[in-house]
Structure formats: C-alpha cells, structure tokens
Image (cartoon, rainbow, N blue to C red):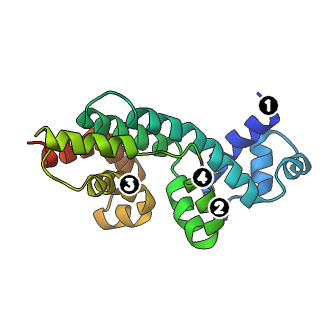
Amino acid sequence: MTTEEKIFNAARIVFQKKGFAGARMQEIADEAGINKAMLHYCFKTKQLLFEAVFMNAFGQLAPQINAIFNSDETVFDKIRKFAHSYISFVIENPYLPQFIIQEMNNNPEFAMSFLNHENRPNPDLLISQIEKEIIAGIIKPINPKQLLLDIFSLTVFPFAAQIMVKAIIQISDSEFNQLMEERKTSIAEQIINSIKR
C-alpha cells in the first residue's frame, strides 16, 4: 500500500468518526502510521486532504453510476441498481453528503469542479430511455427530470440530514443503518410502482 493510500484510508476513518470539523491532521497521521510532517508534505491542509479523499471516492462512484445509466437494461432495473449502488456507497462513506452540502455553501468553486468533472454521472441516455418507455406505454407520462429528482432525493436526503432524521423518528445509529439497508430495495420499488403502467 502506498503512502497516499494509507493516508486516504486513515482520513476516511477519521472523517467518518469525527466529521470534517472535528478531524485533526495529527489523528489522521497517527491512523496512517506516519508522522505529521509527512502528512503535511503530501497534503498541506485538512481541506486539501478532504478534497483529495472526496475526489478519490467520487472517482469510484461516478463510473458505477454511468455504467448503470448507460447499460441496456430497463429503466426499472436501472432504478433498482442505482438505489442499491448509491446507498451502498454512502454507507461506506457516510461523511460525504454533509460535506458536499457544506462545500456547496462554503467552497462553491470546488463543488462546481466535481459537478463539472468529465467523468461525472451523465443521465442523458437514461432521460432518452425514459421518454421512449413512456411512448411504448411501459411508464406513465412523467417528466424524466422529475423522476431523476425523485430518485436522487429519496436516496440522498436521509444521509444529508442524518442527525435530524435520527432525532425526529427517534432511532439509534444501528436502526438508521438498518433502515438504509432496507431502502436499497424499498426506494426502488416505491418509485417503480408509482410510474409503471
């Protein structure tokens, strides 16, 4: 394992436990088994490290999402696979949704850099497929972009508002995780049942 991989793995662990604000570079260095000087040599600030960790994680997710969007499968199967892949990814990287929202407010340039990245998920083919399946009578007449918004909202929101969700419905961390596992299938079936003819 390279030094950079050790740092990324350590940073994920510390960011997940402490959040971005609570994480300290010394803790990350200790977790990686390197000294703080080496960590600062590789990444001068916590912000730069977090951005690098985020882009590394995003680089793993985006190809999975594009593979789903661009496959030959039905829209229904794509919805199932998207919900499963995205929720699985965020369960492994639970700090990312809150960080994205924070960065969109505090550092919009970085947010736009990953949103405009050439490897970002591109839903154009999926939108075209939805339109064709509407014409074929498989799906009810809907705005494809509203459908995408529903999919993204139902998968992203519980993670982005995790503290509020846990407080309002009064659940523990383990109960939250169990609900998220269940959502991998329940979200997809809920959406599919609402749009199929």
In the image, residue 17 lies at what x, y percent?
Answer: 60, 52
Callout count: 4
The mark found on residue 2 in the picture is: 1
- At 52% from the left and 61% from the top, the residue drawn is 98
Pointer 2 or 1: first along the chain: 1
Q: Secondary structure under badge 3?
A: loop
Query: Do the numbered discs 2 and 1 sit on residues whose CB atoms are within 8 Å?
Result: no
What is the distance, in whole Å, between disc 4 and disc 2 at their CAs?
23 Å
- Closest to the camera, between mark 4 and mark 1, is 1
What is the distance, in whole Å, between disc 4 and disc 3 at their CAs?
16 Å
Q: Secondary structure under badge 4?
A: helix
Q: Which residue of the protein is positioned furthest toward the left in this rendering?
A: 197
What is the distance, in whole Å, between disc 2 and disc 3 at their CAs?
33 Å
Which quadrant would the N terminus be assigned to in this image? top right
Q: Amino acid at mark 1?
A: Thr
43 sits to left or right of 124: right
What is the distance, in whole Å, between disc 1 and disc 3 at their CAs?
36 Å
- At 57% from the left and 42% from the top, the residue drawn is 119
Query: Do the numbered discs 4 and 1 sit on residues whose CB atoms are within 8 Å?
Result: no
162 sits to left or right of 60: left
Which quadrant would the C terminus be assigned to in this image? top left
Q: Amino acid at mark 2?
A: Phe
Q: Secondary structure under badge 2?
A: helix
Q: Amino acid at mark 4?
A: Lys
What is the distance, in whole Å, between disc 4 and disc 1 at their CAs?
23 Å
Question: What residue does disc 3 label?
Answer: 172
- At 52% from the left and 36% from the top, the residue drawn is 63
Query: Do the numbered discs 4 and 3 sit on residues whose CB atoms are within 8 Å?
Result: no
